[in-house]
Image (tube, rainbow, N blue to C red):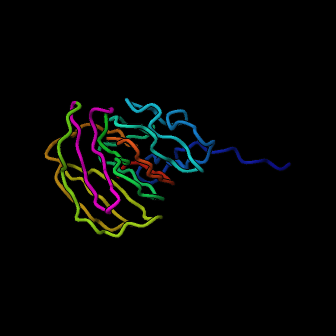
Amino acid sequence: MFLMPVCALPVVESGGGSVFTDDFTGTNGQALEDRTGWTAYNAAGNFEISSNRLSAVGSGSNGVVLCNVSAVDGYAKAIWRGINSQCCFLCVRAADGSNNVSLRINKGGKLQVRSEVGGSHTQPISTSASGLGFVADDEIQLEAEGDTVRVRRNGVSVISASLGGRNASDSGLGVGGSVLSGGTEIIDNFEAGPL
């Protein structure tokens, strides 16, 4: 008798614990929070599936959509498929839409790590110089470990900065932050888990 494999859930075990993955395969227009393993906090309808990728469609709201794996010392990463305007996408150390550390990338290739505590943005924790030469298919990773936040591009560290004690006990991992009107960045192959 031949047995067909059962579709796996987007949580897999690794040596460091559970890792969450989502390749965003699905129906165009499906809200991210309607997919298995995701929960929205002040971000309902801000992110949706578009051509088997994730796109920002919200306007002017702060919020996050967190996956069902969490870690205080953790990471979130994705493949960037398009950079069209300013928008935060990856987040770590998140509790909800008012408490998180997020990464913003803009058309000029400038990265900005931001912290939000109690709904109040801390202006950038760190900002990179423009001209890092981001191109489609770059892998971007945001990670928090101890009191340090790092951003990696294709595995190479491009930002390392102190969190200054902000968001020290929050453990959510996902996408979100300040979704600006017109932000249409598209990401693919999301992964998050403990460091």
Q: Name the residue: 28% across, 60% down.
A: 110
The answer to if 140 sits in the magenta stretch is no
Q: Name the residue: 83% across, 50% down.
A: 2
Q: Position of residue 37 (x, y in %)?
A: 51, 37
The one nearer the camera, 18 or 114, is: 114
Residue farthest along the right direction in this orientation: 1
Q: Name the residue: 23% across, 31% down.
A: 119
The one nearer the camera, 80 or 143, is: 80
Q: Name the residue: 36% across, 51% down.
A: 75
Query: Start and end of the magenta stretch?
Result: 96-118
Number of numbered discs on residues: 0
The answer to if 102 sits in the magenta stretch is yes
Whether 150 is drawn above or below 133: the answer is above
The one nearer the camera, 47 or 142, is: 47
Residue farthest along the front direction in this orientation: 182
Q: Quadrant of residue 71?
A: top left
Say whether residue 155 is left or right of residue 158: right
Q: Quadrant of residue 100?
A: top left
Whether 54 is drawn above or below 127: the answer is above
Whether 61 is drawn above or below 108: the answer is above
Say whether residue 32 is left or right of residue 41: right
The one nearer the camera, 50 or 78, is: 50
Q: Position of residue 99 (x, y in %)?
A: 26, 35
Tell me the chief SS of the magenta region: strand
Q: Position of residue 123 (x, y in %)?
A: 17, 45
